[in-house]
Amino acid sequence: SDWSRKYVEITRSEVNISTRLEGLKPDTSYAVYVQTDTVADADKGAKSNISYIKTNPYNPSSPSNLKVIHKGATWMEIAWSPPAFPNGEIVLYIITSRLYPYIVDMTTDICALVLSQTRRSEIEQLEKQDSTSTEVPTTSEQSAEQGSSSTECCQCSSDLVHKEHQED
């Protein structure tokens, strides 16, 4: 691979001379040497020995392509691609999940998604808890709570429900 050069000008005689090499990649091996240059007409300066150095690891980039590949009533299996830039050896993935009891799926009965104020406050309470599971009433139980004995859909539009969900 290509060598890059950095010129360090010396204005006075120093015992220890140093410079910072920037823009290096984390967890990457580099070869480094120093070459002297004395006068403008010198043909060739002297070189130090080559030192091989590896930079420290750093935060990896994000994993990508997260998807659910299998799911059941009480479990799901997820898969993902490793980070494009691991910046070191990946030794652990931490999987974090959160209970989210209200998920809009526009393929379901829109009227079942309209929430009463009572149901809305129950969901807000669930979101505040650290619980990992909860019982969610079926659609027929929700209708009974709302005082509806009719099997017909409520008079709502999907735009209204979609807008209501976006505001939450």
Image (cartoon, rainbow, N blue to C red):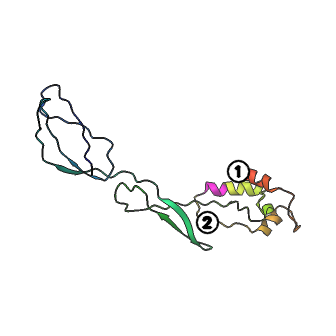
Task: Please state the total of marks drawn on the protein image.
Answer: 2
Q: Residue 133: which numbered mark, if any?
A: 2
Q: Secondary structure at mark 1?
A: helix
Q: Is residue 27 above or below residue 91?
A: above
Q: How packed is label 1: few (under 14 Cα within 10 Å), some, or many (20 or more)?
A: few
* Circle 2 SS class: loop
Residue 75 at least partly seen: no
Residue lying at 87% horizontally and 68% vertically, measured from the top left: 151
Question: Magenta region, mostly helix, strand or loop?
Answer: helix
Question: If you read the primary sequence from the N terminus, does the residue marked by circle 1 or circle 2 appear first?
Answer: 2
Classify 10 Å Cα crowding around label 2: few (below 14), some (14-19), many (20 and above): few
- The residue under label 2 is which amino acid type? Ser
Circle on res. 12 = none
On the image, numbered disc 1 is attached to which residue?
A: 166
Q: At x 78% / y 65%, what residue is drawn?
A: 109
Q: Can you give x and y, in whole percent of width and height, for residue 110 in the image?
A: 78, 61
- Confirm whether residue 153 shows in the render: yes
**Disc 1 + disc 2, Cβ < 8 Å:** no
Between 129 and 159, which is closer to the camera in this rendering?
A: 159
Residue 128 position, x and y percent, is 62, 54
Given residues 30 and 107, the one toward you in this image is 30
Query: What amino acid is labelled 1 in the image?
Result: Gln
Residue 107 colored in magenta in the image: no
Residue 67 placed where, x, y %? 55, 65
Q: Which residues are magenta?
A: 125-129
Residue that protrudes farthest toward the top in the picture = 11
From the image, state whether disc 1 or disc 2 is nearer to you: 1
- Tell me which residue sits at (24%, 40%) in the image: 5
Rendered location of residue 37, percent (x, y)? 14, 34
Along the line of sight, which residue is nearer the eye, 90 or 14? 14
